[in-house]
Amino acid sequence: MTETGHAHGHDRGSEHGHEHGHPNGPEIEQAWLDLVATARRSAADGLVVGTSGNVSVRVGDLVLVTPSGVPYDRLTPADTVAVDLDGRQVTGRLRPTSELPMHLEVYRNSTAGAVVHTHAVHATAVSTLVPELPLIHYMAADFGGPVRVAPYAMYGTDALAGHMVRALAGRTGCLLQNHGTVTYADTLDKAYDRTAQLEWMCRLWLTATSVPGRTPTLLSRGQVRDVEEQLRGYGQRS
Ligand SMILES: [Zn+2]
């Protein structure tokens, strides 16, 4: 459960996100660089196509968030977009992502330091098939149990944000029906890692269930709870 093994880590400043209070300029600049790096990585790793996902990071009482409709490779420090927890824009001219209501709902309802939203293909496929991802792997423990699917509502709406918050109860990630993924964590790196793990677990389930005439074994809730305890013991869970 460690952060090792990233082929291209962007670890600098990733601990900034949960120090609440009034952030200073350098803190925001660094957080923006980290956010852009994470957004670019989500596209490079194939979790996002074009500008179809979005990333945010909390810096004190501000939320930095990717802007709407701008390719990540064009984002510069001058494009920094920051809003307060009510969604009022305090920095930048570009409009925040249309999925801002989802990001803000996560911060209002958790201690999240960062939120990642993607349309990753296997995870989105699973969102059309089941109300929650069956316990195909013990990594479900990192999400606090079976990952739920939030019912469909149009993107960018408060209704979708509401469905998402309910699906996230006691969890660090969820699927959005016919839409994609949402994960959060203390740091951008960890939130990104969770998204990659969720996509991987969905791919695993799709692979196992696609073998004709066979049904995959699943783990029990108890078996996954045991892993949750174990992870907590290592102090790595966020
Ligand atoms: Zn979306």
Image: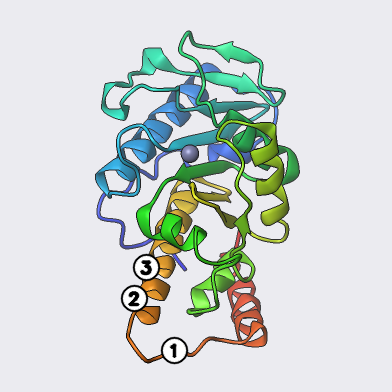
The three-letter amino acid code for the residue at tag 3 is Arg
Mark 2, residues whose alpha carbon is within 10 Å: few (<14), some, or many (≥20)?
Answer: few
Residue 53 placement (x, y as % from top left):
42, 38
Q: Which of 24 and 115 is in front in this view?
A: 115
Residue that badge 1 annotates: 215
Residue 91 higher or lower than 28, as above or below: above
The three-letter amino acid code for the residue at tag 2 is Thr
Using residue 51 as the reference point, say whether residue 178 is left or right of it: right
The reply to whether callout 2 and callout 1 are in contact (CB within 8 Å) is no
Using residue 217 as the reference point, say whether residue 48 is left or right of it: left
Residue 85 higher or lower than 15, as above or below: above
Residue 69 placement (x, y as % from top left):
39, 22
Residue situated furthest front in the rendering: 213
Residue that badge 2 annotates: 207
- Give the structural element (helix, strand or loop) at label 2: helix
Q: Nearer the viewer, residue 121 or 137?
A: 121
Q: Which residue is drawn at 59% across and 42% down?
A: 113
- Give the structural element (helix, strand or loop) at label 1: loop
Q: Residue at x 38, y 65 (%)?
A: 200
Residue that badge 3 annotates: 203
C-alpha distance separating marks 3 and 2 = 6 Å
The three-letter amino acid code for the residue at tag 1 is Thr
What is the tally of numbered marks visible in this picture? 3
Q: Which residue is drawn at 66% across and 80% down?
A: 225
Q: Disc 3, ligand 1: is the CB inside 8 Å?
A: no
Q: How is the image coloured?
A: rainbow
Mark 3, residues whose alpha carbon is within 10 Å: few (<14), some, or many (≥20)?
Answer: some
